[in-house]
Amino acid sequence: MSVEPQATEAAPSENGGPLVDIEHLKVFFPIKQGFIVDREVARVHAVNDVTLSISEGETVGLVGESGCGKTTMSRAIMRLIDATDGHLRFHGEDITSAGRKQLEPLRREMQMVFQDPFASLNPRKRVVQIIGQPLRLHGTPRDKVEDRVRELLTLVGLAPEHLNRYPHEFSGGQRQRIGVARALALEPRLIVLDEPVSALDVSVQAQIINLLDDLQDEFRLTYMFVAHDLSVVRHVSDRIAVMYLGKLMELSPSEELYTKPIHPYTFALLSAIPIPDPEENRSRERIVVSGEPPNPIDPPSGCVFHPRCPRATGICREVEPPLARYPNGHLAACHHPLNVSAEEIKGAVKDPASPLSAGDELPSASEADSSASSA
Amino acid sequence: MSVGPAPSGDPILTVEELHVSFATEEGVVQAVDGVSLELQPGEVLAVVGESGSGKSVTAMTVMGLTRSPNARFEGTAHYKGTELIDAPEDQLRQIRGAEIAMIFQDPMTSLNPVMKIGDQIVEQIQEHEALPDQQARERAIELLEKVGIPRARERIDNYPFEFSGGMRQRVMIALALSCNPSVLIADEPTTALDVTIQAQILLRMRELRDETGAGIILVTHDLGVVADIADRIAVMYAGRIVEHGTLDEIFYDPQHPYTWGLLGSIARVDRPRPERLPAIAGLPPSLSDRPSGCHFRPRCPHEFAKCVEVPPLEARLEGNPEHRDRCWLTPEQKKQLREVRPGEIGLAAKSTGADAA
């Protein structure tokens, strides 16, 4: 598979720096207990030192199992949840602890589409009110709102006459289109899509994905696509970040993640997905990882995946692996990487995106996979 | 490891011409419209279709779980000589759980939240067998171990909320298996679970099928899961079975345009990204106002005059009476119209874009 080594991953886009810059972001949720006075007894490590940047016009897929912190991370980017530590920059501006006033102009530049099209639209409001609300809040004159809503409905493939209907009069796929129209209303630059198609039927999923694709081309949107379904993510993303227990495990150009997964967790995740093709399903190599993700209140030492990892050794229990940057811009945090050749290991460097608590030791040359071709 | 269908003889469960409709304020909803199925012991029959295609209603009607004052039933469902559709409730209670067991989609809500999981399993065992408490408890522990719950002896006294989603689904499976049923109906058993856990559960279900020889009806919309575990497939659309065949027949020689569309619109994890995902245009019809004739007609690009008549579900391929479908196109036309590339089937006969091989 020849993947064009495009402008390597964190490279700034043509028009200046990255749109979103996440630096060593941590989000911990305190668990309080006590009589009269609550004391913090423990913390849920939801996002634990993640560094990631998203360039303008790009789609970054964020995948992982439930509880890995992907939703918390997307909400932290939207500033719906406050970060415990680290920095968050939007178009160069540090918004980690920006107040309401400072955020207000930025709100129109970042929008969100939610998972459940049944729960995310107010059942008592008409479509024109739902889509028109952000417009009114941001000062569109009353008489212009309706025209704009008609325009938006057409854009997402709904009939403009439907603007006086209620959400219950639409199917799941159509409701998701309404959600997309609402997100588009203020012409944002960034749209965070939190599992936008997982509640939909397959034939409708494809329609929504194609719609998102068209809109991105038309408006040069930047997407952060959060999903647990790796097949869907493959079809939309430019780069994919794999999270596990609050940590970034692998960050790779989209195609390469599937043809050449480096982290054993990514490989396990990929091989757990049944392929809708009986013959290939029978013939492919699969590993079924045992157990379940551990408790994020007390994450394991060293590499957080080690209790379930078939390749884990002593070092994995003791030293947290740094994110190694392999020559083609593929990042992975693993002491025993898969699918990398000796030259690639030699060329690997510790990436500044590595968690601060990570060790310095990169995988040794003996980890090289002789069958791995440096494509 | 292809486990072929076991055409060993008599089916264990036979559903014939099942019609289910519900009277609602918006009119009569015809949820199931003439469904016929057969289940052999030891096989996995997958019923696939989109939401609202009637797959769950079919499964639940067999269990007698859709009975309500506004429901109407026609047709028969035979289980080992017992007629299920109009069986009295007492008789159904004997069969339900013991002979035919069900695994529901949502493990979070299908267990009793205020009862220890062990007690729930013991209750079920004792409902159907006169077993002393201690023995029933031992059986419950054994079952929990079998479905892969670590430290089952300790965990039997936990409440459902103390388990994760995957573990709860295992408890559901243990509960379903507690009386050695000969038919297991699994309604989207892994939809609510993460993929790594899904793989574990599917593996477990396959092992149990091999061990106990139970027949499994798997209701799902996930064709990946189907390819992984099913022997035969029934594709449902708007209350009808539109195509029926073995796993390989449906995946490699699909006859109905809806099946083509369904197979074509899956985003595949093992394939590079195509220019666009082929989608089926339009939406499934409302079940209270279905189009006349073939229900797929309005979404089908190959519609022609005859489609307003309803074709029967019948075999059209020579020498293969088991592969049946409901479409007026001739097998030759179908071969021409459907675009079959290895593992790639589209609804419309146009190129899906250049994805480099």
Image: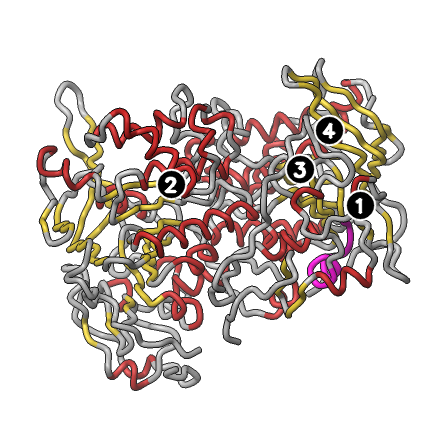
Using residue B43 as the reference point, say whether residue A196 is left or right of it: left
Residue A216 seen by the camera: yes
The residue at 41%/37% (across/down) is: A153
For label 1, the SS is helix
Using residue B200 as the reference point, say whether residue A20 is left or right of it: left
Question: Which kind of residue does numbered mark 4 sit on?
Answer: Thr
Question: Which kind of residue does numbered mark 3 sit on?
Answer: Ser
Q: Position of residue B108 (x, y in %)?
A: 48, 32
Residue carrying label 4: B61
Segment tinted magenta in the rendering: B243-253
Q: Chain of mark 2?
A: A
For label 4, the SS is helix
Is residue A252 one of those drawn in magenta?
Answer: no
The residue at 41%/35% (across/down) is: A178
Q: Is residue A82 above or below residue A26?
A: above
Q: First in sequence: mark 4 or mark 1?
A: 4
Q: Nearer the viewer, mark 4 or mark 1?
A: 1
Q: Is residue A206 above or below residue B97?
A: below
Q: First in sequence: mark 3 or mark 4?
A: 3
Question: Which kind of residue does numbered mark 2 sit on?
Answer: Val
Q: Nearer the viewer, mark 3 or mark 1?
A: 1
Query: For this rendering, which residue is in front, B191 or B8?
Result: B191
Residue carrying label 2: A180
Q: Which mark is residue B305?
A: 1
Task: Check contact, mark 3 vs mark 2: CB within 8 A.
Answer: no
Q: Position of residue B24 (x, y in %)?
A: 66, 17
Using residue B76 as the reference point, say whether residue B288 is left or right of it: left
